[in-house]
Image (tube, rainbow, N blue to C red):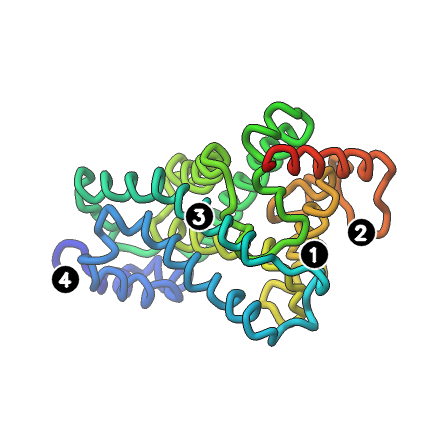
């Protein structure tokens, strides 16, 4: 076994008990350096997850196969709204994602992938750290922009054009908010020095959770449903309520910070202040887009 060799994962005794489960996955990755070692992969992979996973909910919207699980069955986006969401998404990706990926592909060197996979414990711990970092950072940014009308109008009102969530809304962001989300999703992984396998898994997980939060369906058979029932993850209902009453449910994924700061709502106990601020922000969003 010479250089970066897949068999190293099988011959290191320390790997056998703690991380052998990840060795076959990493072997498969190392055997395909023309894809995974390329500098553009980190940018293209989240986009691939977004399009492929989002397509599931697009099919559900078109066919109506999951209508019984809709959170707001009487509200459907109009063709004009969908067109607006699509144009804005194309614009944001054109000015940020495409140039960044082109520059990375042309200027960044081919990556040297580590010979060994992450340990199972390290993989789980890094994922947890990245999840908490993203949730904490966006919660702080989010609540600030809902409390400050000027910031809200400039950076976040666009996202709140929709009072009923659907998969199209997940990427209906201003350029400024998109940059914040991208930074919070990627920079912690770089600062942590996360293993590439952990970083890629995190990118996929963050995109998946974002789509789940905006899909507009409360699916009892979703793999993450038990975590929602336990009150760990917010899920689709949690974020759909935020679009109905914007001063509630500020955290993107977890419910912890909302419970700590009193912004959590399950829809049964909305305070008068939450109603007041919610209606005010709905009006601000309408004014922003007139």
164 versus 59 height, above or below: above
Task: Answer with the quarter of the image where residue 140 lies.
Answer: top right
Q: Which residue is mark 3?
A: 87
**Of the numbered discs in the image, which one, if any, rests on residue 267?**
2
Are there few (<14), some (14-19), or many (20+) residues within 10 Å of tag 4?
Answer: few
Task: Name the residue rendered at 66%, 71% in the picture.
Answer: 67
Residue 268, position in %: x, y? 85, 52
Cα separation between marks 2 and 3:
32 Å
Badge 1 marks a residue whose secondary structure is helix
Q: Nearer the viewer, residue 193 or 89?
A: 89
Q: Secondary structure at mark 4?
A: loop
Q: Residue at x 47, y 32 (%)?
A: 176
Q: Nearer the viewer, residue 175 or 116?
A: 175
Q: Quadrant of the N terminus?
A: bottom left
Say which label, 4 or 3, has the lower sequence index: 4
Where residue 160 appears, x then y in whole percent?
A: 62, 42
The label on residue 237 is: 1
Residue at mark 1 to residue at mark 3: CA–CA distance:
26 Å
Is tag 1's residue or tag 4's residue first in the polypeptide sequence?
4
Mark 1 or mark 2, which has the lower sequence index? 1
């Amino acid at each position: 076994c010479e250089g970066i060799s897949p068999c190293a994962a099988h011959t290191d005794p320390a790997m056998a008990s703690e991380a052998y489960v990840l060795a076959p996955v990493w072997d498969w990755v190392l055997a395909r350096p023309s894809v995974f070692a390329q500098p553009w992969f980190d940018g293209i992979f989240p986009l691939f997850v977004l399009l492929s996973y989002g397509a599931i909910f697009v099919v559900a919207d078109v066919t109506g196969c999951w209508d019984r699980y809709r959170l707001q069955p009487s509200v459907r986006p109009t063709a004009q709204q969908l067109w607006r969401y699509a144009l804005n998404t194309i614009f944001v990706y054109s000015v940020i994602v495409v140039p960044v990926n082109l520059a990375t592909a042309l200027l960044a060197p081919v990556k040297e992938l580590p010979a060994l996979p992450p340990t199972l414990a390290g993989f789980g711990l890094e994922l947890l750290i990245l999840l908490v970092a993203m949730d904490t950072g966006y919660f702080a940014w989010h609540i600030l922009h809902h409390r400050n009308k000027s910031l809200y109008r400039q950076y976040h009102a666009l996202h709140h054009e929709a009072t009923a969530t659907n998969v199209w809304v997940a990427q209906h962001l201003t350029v400024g908010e998109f940059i914040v989300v991208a930074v919070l999703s990627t920079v912690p992984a770089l600062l942590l020095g996360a293993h590439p396998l952990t970083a890629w898994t995190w990118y996929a997980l963050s995109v998946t959770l974002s789509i789940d939060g905006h899909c507009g369906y409360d699916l009892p058979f979703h793999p993450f449903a038990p975590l929602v029932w336990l009150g760990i993850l917010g899920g689709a209902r949690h974020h759909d309520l935020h679009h109905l009453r914007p001063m509630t449910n500020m955290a993107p994924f977890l419910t912890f910070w909302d419970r700590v700061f009193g912004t959590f709502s399950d829809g049964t106990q909305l305070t008068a202040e939450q109603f007041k601020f919610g209606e005010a922000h709905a009006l601000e969003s309408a004014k922003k887009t007139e």
